[in-house]
Image (tube, coloured by chain):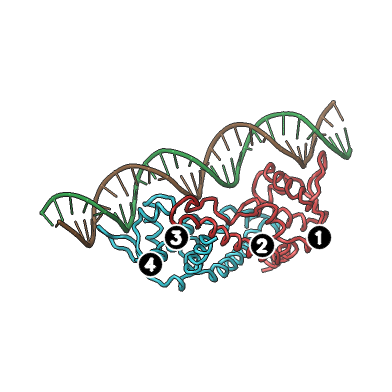
Chain colours: A red, B cyan, C green, D brown
DNA sequence: GGTTACTGTAATATTAACAGTTACAGTTGA
DNA sequence: TCAACTGTAACTGTTAATATTACAGTAACC
């Protein structure tokens, strides 16, 4: 799995948690434990997908513009990490003589597409709001 | 996803397809499109899990020792690639002051454990025998 | 018993992916 | 005009993945 997916989820949960719903890339980066430039890159994608708005210039930053209970991890997965479980390496070769070797790529591809759907379906059931609730539950114990 | 998973599945399908159910690492490697040494490593794991038997020496090689319709991709996943979808990178830090940053690792870990179960469940429904059938279906079209 | 054809395994390149970092232009508010 | 931001691209360093080599161990066959 892409680590940008994690950065995206973490950033959105953080924004959802903040009273004013806003934070700068520097603040988010410190919380996520990575670099501001990386956060800006990831949140740039989220902006293009319409999940956050940004304000440049002094006093600027990122703001969540969707209800946390309306946004699922599947949305984020599709934006940040679609196709992440399919390996970039593949076996066999369509030009090969052997039936197994020549058709394996296609069959394997189908298998992973199915896996991807399965995963998306699972992520569909988890919202940013729920993530925040789970974190609060951790805190109490 | 681990590419060793693919090599394992491909090798087992190939063995299931061969009339005598046997092949050498060299033959398998040519079919998979990788190196014999890599095949030997992967099939070494499958031997330890009891899915294939090996015979060293001249005329040796690998033989499937389980009914292809009894062995699922979930078995192979557990042997070769358990935990593959969980990223090795993680955000936040348990020692941090912020509630979000300090608990994100635990919550994210739970999310990915759930995703893993979901994926295993999906793989449980696909057998090596089915993979071979799908390949035959590809061939006809 | 020697030769040949294999597996088992470790060590070592080589390559690709990934995260970290720097840099700077563009934007906005004070 | 200055200071504090975002938006991007380029570059570096590190780690992970794959390919390759090498060789000891084992079994069949003549």
Q: Which mark is residue B25?
A: none
User: x, y (%) of residue A36?
Assistant: 69, 43
What's the residue at 76%, 51% (across, down)? A49
Q: Does the rendering let one see residue B92?
A: no
- In primary-sequence order, the first of circles 3 and 4 is 3
Give how far apart the Cα atoms at labels 1 and 4 are.
Answer: 53 Å
User: Residue under mark 1: which chain is it in?
Assistant: A
Left or right: B88 in relation to B99: left
At mark 3, the secondary structure is helix
Camera-nearest residue between B32 and A140? B32
User: x, y (%) of residue B62?
Assistant: 34, 62
Q: Which mark is residue B8?
A: 3
Left or right: B79 in relation to B91: left
Q: Does the rendering let one see residue A23?
A: yes
User: x, y (%) of residue B118?
Assistant: 60, 68
Q: Quadrant of the C terminus of chain B?
A: bottom right
Select label 3 or label 4 by which is in front.
Answer: 4
Camera-nearest residue between A12 and B95? A12
Camera-nearest residue between A122 and A98? A98
Select label 3 or label 2 by which is in front.
Answer: 3
Give how far apart the Cα atoms at labels 3 and 4 are.
Answer: 12 Å
Q: Which residue is mark 4?
A: B64
What's the residue at 72%, 49% (across, down)? A28
Of all residues, the one furthest to the front in this rendering is B140
Label 2 neighbourhood size at 10 Å, few (<14), some (14-19), many (20+)?
many
Q: Which residue is mark 1?
A: A67
User: Residue under mark 2: which chain is it in?
Assistant: A
């Amino acid at each position: 799995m892409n680590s940008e997916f994690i950065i995206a989820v973490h950033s959105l949960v953080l924004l959802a948690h903040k009273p004013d719903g806003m934070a700068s890339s520097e603040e988010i980066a410190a919380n996520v434990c990575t670099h501001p430039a990386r956060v800006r890159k990831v949140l740039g994608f989220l902006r293009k997908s319409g999940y956050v708005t940004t304000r440049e210039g002094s006093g600027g930053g990122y703001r969540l513009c969707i209800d946390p209970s309306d946004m699922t991890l599947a949305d984020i997965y599709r934006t940040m990490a679609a196709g992440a479980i399919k390996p970039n390496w593949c076996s066999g070769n369509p030009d090969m003589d052997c039936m197994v070797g020549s058709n394996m790529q296609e069959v394997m591809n189908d298998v992973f597409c199915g896996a991807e759907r399965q995963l998306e379906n699972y992520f569909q059931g988890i919202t940013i709001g729920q993530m925040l609730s789970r974190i609060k539950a951790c805190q109490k114990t």
